[in-house]
Image (cartoon, grey):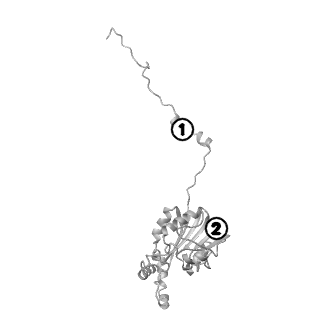
């Protein structure tokens, strides 16, 4: 969490706009260095304080609003920045959640996503401990691979700007042994960065735009289809020789 906090402070400090939100994990203050005037901490169905029975009585402390991650209460093209710290891997439907992110972001809006890498020591330990068993909220938690998430973002029209990894030391019960294995972080960052335990992706929503052309500009160009094409006439006597009837 300390590494993700440092990365969020550095990457989101110069992201400008008016509306930004962080979905889930209130222990991480990803928007503290951002200067947008409107910033929200929102909870979803995978946060224990934001369960359906709790949200019915009111918004729990620590959150500005609670909603379902598959249906966001914002209109299209209304947010400038969205932060998803380990939210897709805990969402009831990560595909629907990511589609909602694409819908609510304005063109050139940005999304910051962090997740556990299944192709790592941490991912292997997580799958061995949890598997597909439902968590405390009743939903199955599944890790999403880094390359798969990049493909999802490309299909939705996002352009990945930053990709970073961290955490090559196995999560052990003994802190003393983890300190002895700190050299794995240096080796992993140099030789196998894609096998880091945590990945971070910063992507920008791209929308193809059009340009209005002045009518006089393209009308002044002569089209080759308008040029006259010479045709042979059947009644033309040019070059025709007349043979006398007597010689025939």
Q: Residue at image x 60%, y 46%?
A: 213
Residue at disc 1, secondary structure: loop
Residue most extreme to the right: 37
Q: Which residue is mark 1?
A: 223
Q: Nearer the viewer, residue 118 or 163?
A: 118
Residue 52 is marked as none
Q: Residue at image x 43%, y 83%?
A: 129
> Residue 240: where, in percent of width, then height?
40, 18
Q: Residue at image x 49%, y 91%?
A: 176
Rendered position, 129 above or below 39: below
Which is in the foreground here, disc 2 or disc 1?
Answer: 2
Mark 2 Cα shell of 10 Å, populated few (<14), some (14-19), many (≥20): some
Mark 1 Cα shell of 10 Å, populated few (<14), some (14-19), many (≥20): few
> Residue 206: where, in percent of width, then height?
55, 60
Q: Nearer the viewer, residue 173 or 235?
A: 173
Circle count: 2
Residue most extreme to the top: 246
Q: What quarter of the picture does the C terminus occupy? A: top left
> Residue 197: where, in percent of width, then height?
48, 78
114 sits left or right of 41 in the view:
left
Q: Quadrant of residue 242?
A: top left
Q: Nearer the viewer, residue 158 or 70?
A: 70
> Residue 98: where, in percent of width, then height?
52, 67
Q: Along the polypeptide, which appears first: circle 2 or circle 1?
A: 2
Residue at disc 2, secondary structure: strand
Q: Which residue is mark 2?
A: 19
Compute the Cα span from label 2 to label 1: 49 Å
Q: Nearer the viewer, residue 23 or 176?
A: 23
Q: Residue at image x 51%, y 62%?
A: 156
Q: What quarter of the picture does the N terminus occupy? A: bottom right
């Amino acid at each position: 969490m300390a590494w993700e906090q440092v990365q969020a402070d550095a990457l989101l400090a110069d992201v400008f706009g008016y509306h930004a939100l962080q979905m889930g994990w209130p222990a991480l203050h990803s928007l503290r260095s951002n200067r947008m005037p409107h910033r929200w901490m929102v909870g979803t169905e995978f946060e224990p304080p934001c369960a359906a029975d709790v949200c019915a009585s009111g918004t729990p402390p620590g959150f500005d609003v609670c909603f379902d991650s598959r249906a966001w209460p914002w209109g299209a093209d209304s947010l400038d920045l969205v932060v998803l710290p380990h939210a897709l891997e805990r969402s009831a439907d990560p595909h629907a959640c990511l589609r909602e992110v694409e819908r609510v972001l304005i063109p050139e809006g940005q999304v910051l996503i962090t997740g556990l890498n299944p192709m790592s020591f941490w991912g292997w330990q997580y799958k061995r401990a949890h598997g597909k068993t439902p968590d405390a909220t009743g939903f199955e938690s599944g890790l999403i691979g880094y390359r798969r998430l990049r493909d999802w973002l490309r299909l939705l029209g996002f352009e990945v700007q930053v990709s970073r990894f961290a955490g090559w030391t196995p999560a052990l019960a003994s802190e003393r042994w983890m300190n002895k294995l700190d050299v794995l972080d240096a080796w992993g960052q140099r030789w196998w960065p894609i096998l880091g335990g945590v990945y971070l992706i910063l992507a920008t929503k791209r929308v193809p735009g059009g340009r209005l052309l002045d009518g006089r500009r393209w009308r002044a160009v002569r089209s080759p289809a308008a040029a006259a094409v010479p045709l042979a006439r059947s009644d033309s006597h040019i070059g025709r020789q007349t043979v006398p009837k007597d010689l025939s």
